[in-house]
Image (cartoon, grey):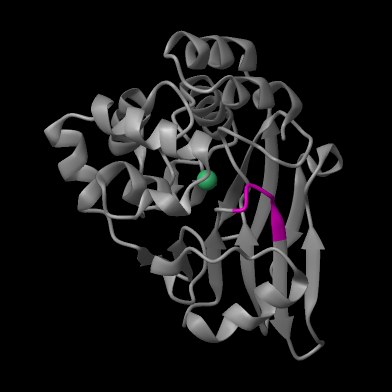
C-alpha cells in the first residue's frame, strides 16, 4: 500500500488539489494528514471537507487548536492570529465538531503520525536541528514517525550504524527516495503542502511505500497566484499572499 503523507495545507485548496492529483498518479491510495489543514489560506472549509473525504487518517495541528479556541492566540504572530480568527468565523459547527474530534497522535502500521513532535505533541515543539530530531526517538514506539509543523522536509534516523540527518529543504530534492534499512528507525518531516518555507514555492509531500519500505519526497507546482489572490480578496494579511510566490 502507498500513502500520500501530507501536512500544513493551511487552507490552500489549489496546492491540496495539485498534491492529491500527483498522489493519485503516483499510485498512493491512502492519504494521511498531519494537521494544520487550516490557518493562513482562504479555503479552510473546502480543505477540511476534501481531507475529511479523502484522508485515511488525520491528526490535529496547532492551527486547528488556534481556530477552535483551544490554544491561546498570544502564541501566534499577528498574521497567524488574524488568520485564526478569520478561520474561526468560516468554520461551521459541523466543521468545528469534526476538527475538535481529531487526535493529537495516531498510529498506522509501522508509523506514528503527529503534527509537531512525538514528545508532548500538545506543546507543538519544532524539530529543526539534527539534535531536535534525535532527542524525539524515545517518545514513539513504532519504527517510523511522520511529522510536519516546521514546513521544512527532512529525515532523521537512528540505528546501530549511528545517527543520520538529511535536510531535504529546497528545490534539489524533488523525487528524492529514502529507503528504510533494517534495524533503523526514522522520523520524516513531510514539509508543507500549502505554505512551503524552504525557498521552493512548490507544494511538498511524501509518498510512503509500506511494502517497499521507503519514502519519496515529491514537490508539486500549483497555481500559487490564484491562492494568493483569494487570500487578498478575503482581507487576510498581504504577507500571507506574497510569501507563496517565494516559498518563504
Ligand atoms: Zn503549519
Asked whether residue 56 is in view, the answer is no
Residue 110 in the magenta stretch? The answer is no
Q: Position of residue 8 (x, y in %)?
A: 51, 42
From the viewer's perspective, is residue 4 above or below residue 13?
below
Q: Residue furthest left?
A: 93
Main secondary-structure element of the magenta-colored stretch = loop
**Residue 27, percent across and down?**
54, 37
Residue 153 magenta-highlighted: yes
The residue located at (81%, 42%) in the rendering is 170
Magenta segment? 150-154
Q: Which residue is at a point 42% across and 32% down the rendered structure image?
A: 82
Examine the rendering and report whether any part of residue 12 can be seen. Answer: yes
- Residue under the image location 39 percent in, 22 percent down: 43
For residue 126, which quarter of the picture? bottom right
Left or right side of 209 for 233? left
Q: Position of residue 149 (x, y in %)?
A: 55, 53
Q: Is 77 positioned to the left or the right of 86 in the image?
A: right
Rendering coords of residue 2 (x, y %): 52, 49
What residue is shown at x 49% (from left), y 82% (from top)?
139
Amino acid at each position: 500500500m502507498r500513502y500520500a503523507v501530507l501536512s500544513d495545507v493551511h487552507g490552500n485548496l489549489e496546492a491540496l488539489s495539485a498534491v492529491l492529483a500527483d498522489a493519485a498518479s503516483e499510485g498512493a491510495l491512502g492519504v494521511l494528514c498531519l494537521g494544520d489543514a487550516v490557518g493562513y489560506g482562504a479555503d479552510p472549509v473546502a480543505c477540511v471537507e476534501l481531507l475529511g473525504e479523502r484522508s485515511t487518517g488525520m491528526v490535529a495541528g496547532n492551527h486547528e487548536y488556534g481556530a477552535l479556541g483551544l490554544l491561546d492566540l498570544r502564541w501566534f504572530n499577528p498574521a497567524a492570529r488574524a488568520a485564526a480568527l478569520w478561520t474561526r468565523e468560516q468554520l461551521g459547527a459541523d466543521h468545528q465538531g469534526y476538527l475538535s474530534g481529531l487526535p493529537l497522535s495516531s498510529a498506522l502500521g509501522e508509523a506514528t503520525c503527529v503534527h509537531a513532535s512525538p514528545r508532548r505533541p500538545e506543546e507543538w515543539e519544532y524539530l529543526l536541528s539534527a539534535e531536535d530530531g534525535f532527542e524525539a526517538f524515545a517518545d514513539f514506539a513504532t519504527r517510523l514517525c511522520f511529522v510536519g509543523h516546521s514546513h521544512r522536509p527532512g529525515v532523521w534516523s537512528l540505528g546501530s550504524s549511528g545517527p543520520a540527518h538529511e535536510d531535504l529543504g529546497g528545490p534539489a530534492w524533488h523525487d528524492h527516495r529514502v529507503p528504510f534499512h533494517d534495524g533503523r528507525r526514522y522520523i520524516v518531516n513531510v514539509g508543507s503542502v500549502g505554505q512551503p518555507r524552504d525557498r521552493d514555492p512548490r507544494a511538498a509531500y511524501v509518498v510512503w511505500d509500506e511494502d517497499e519500505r521507503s519514502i519519496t519526497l515529491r514537490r508539486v507546482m500549483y497555481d500559487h497566484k490564484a491562492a494568493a489572490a483569494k487570500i487578498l480578496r478575503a482581507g487576510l494579511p498581504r504577507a500571507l499572499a506574497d510569501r507563496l510566490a517565494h516559498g518563504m
